[in-house]
Image (cartoon, grey):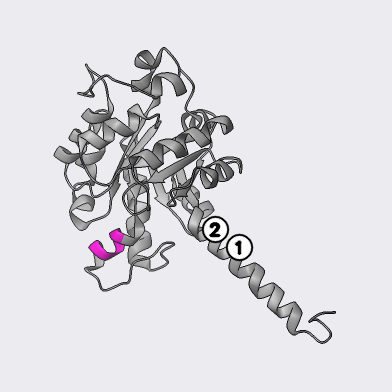
């Protein structure tokens, strides 16, 4: 079976950089995959992507060697297994609040005897290799998203779940949950109460021998998060990168045109 680049990065002592795909476009996935990310996550929860679209995006990523991952819409073993059968080397599941939910996620990701995943790697047997069954349990990643006050309260029990690789912090929903809407959702939290929570999650994961992942907005914050102990940081949503680059190009062009002698010069 092919290696998982994220696990390889960890084995070398580094933190992995994950990209995010929200547009159902194989070409966009192919372009992103060529930029040096360790992994790319196809977002089926909030992205405009369905299952067939995700498969095409996985196919487009294959040549780059990047690890294909998926955020599933919800805790549904059926879609978890289908994404793995499509070739995902990692699954991120939103809104995991209890150890029981974490156990259901882990069971859906792992083949027996470690879990209850049904065998039928339709595409994965091609994309990951003919010995997929033997290597899948060790290669595939399972992340439970910590996004609510309840999930935070049950963090230690969630981290103790067999078969779970770690937790993934969604700072927008976590901020809503922890502050009960007092603070607006968003990435790269600087409020002391949220920084303490985000640091605590990384520390708890490390103490439990698990991995911690954080969704970030800026490279500077991602670097800071790695310093706090995060093992994987998500940077660069396809739609946001496209919008930022387009806006910057238009603004620079209009600025040049507005300069004396600029327009038509």
Can residue 160 be seen? Answer: no
Residue at image location 42% in from the left, 67% down from the top: 190
Q: Viewer-proximal residue, 87 or 39?
A: 87
x and y percentages locating residue 244 in the rendered image: 56, 64
SS class of the residue under badge 2? Answer: helix
Q: Is residue 109 above or below residue 54?
A: above
Q: Residue furthest left?
A: 100
**Disc 1: which residue:** 245
Quadrant into which the C terminus falls? bottom right
Bounds of the magenta segment: 173-177
The dominant secondary structure in magenta is helix
Which of the labelled discs sits on residue 111, or is there none? none
Q: Are marks 1 and 2 in contact (CB under 8 Å)?
A: yes
SS class of the residue under badge 1? Answer: helix
x and y percentages locating residue 164 in the rendered image: 28, 33
Q: Is residue 133 above or below residue 196?
A: above
Residue at image location 46% in from the left, 29% down from the top: 7
Residue 57 on the magenta span? no
């Amino acid at each position: 079976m092919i290696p998982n680049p994220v696990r390889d990065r960890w084995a070398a002592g580094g933190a992995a950089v994950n990209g995010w795909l929200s547009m159902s476009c194989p070409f966009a996935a192919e372009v992103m995959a060529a930029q040096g990310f360790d992994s790319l996550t196809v977002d089926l929860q909030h992205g405009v992507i369905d299952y067939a679209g995700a498969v095409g995006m996985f196919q487009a990523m294959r040549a780059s060697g990047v690890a294909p991952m998926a955020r599933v819409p919800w805790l549904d073993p059926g879609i978890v297994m289908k994404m793995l059968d499509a070739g995902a080397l990692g699954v991120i599941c939103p809104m995991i609040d209890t150890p029981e939910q974490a156990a259901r996620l882990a069971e859906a990701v792992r083949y027996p005897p470690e879990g209850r995943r049904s065998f039928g790697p339709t595409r994965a047997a091609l994309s990951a290799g003919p010995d997929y069954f033997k290597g899948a349990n060790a290669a595939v990643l399972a992340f439970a998203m910590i996004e609510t006050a309840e999930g935070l309260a049950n963090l230690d029990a969630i981290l103790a779940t067999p078969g779970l690789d770690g937790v993934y912090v969604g700072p927008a929903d976590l901020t809503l949950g922890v502050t009960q809407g007092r603070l607006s959702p968003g990435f790269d939290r600087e409020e002391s109460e949220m920084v303490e929570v985000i640091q605590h999650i990384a520390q708890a994961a490390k103490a439990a021998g698990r991995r911690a992942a954080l969704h970030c907005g800026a490279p500077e914050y991602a670097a800071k998060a790695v310093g706090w102990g995060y093992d994987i940081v998500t940077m660069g949503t396809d739609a946001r990168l496209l919008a930022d680059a387009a806006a910057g190009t238009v603004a620079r062009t209009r600025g040049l045109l507005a300069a004396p002698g600029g327009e038509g010069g």
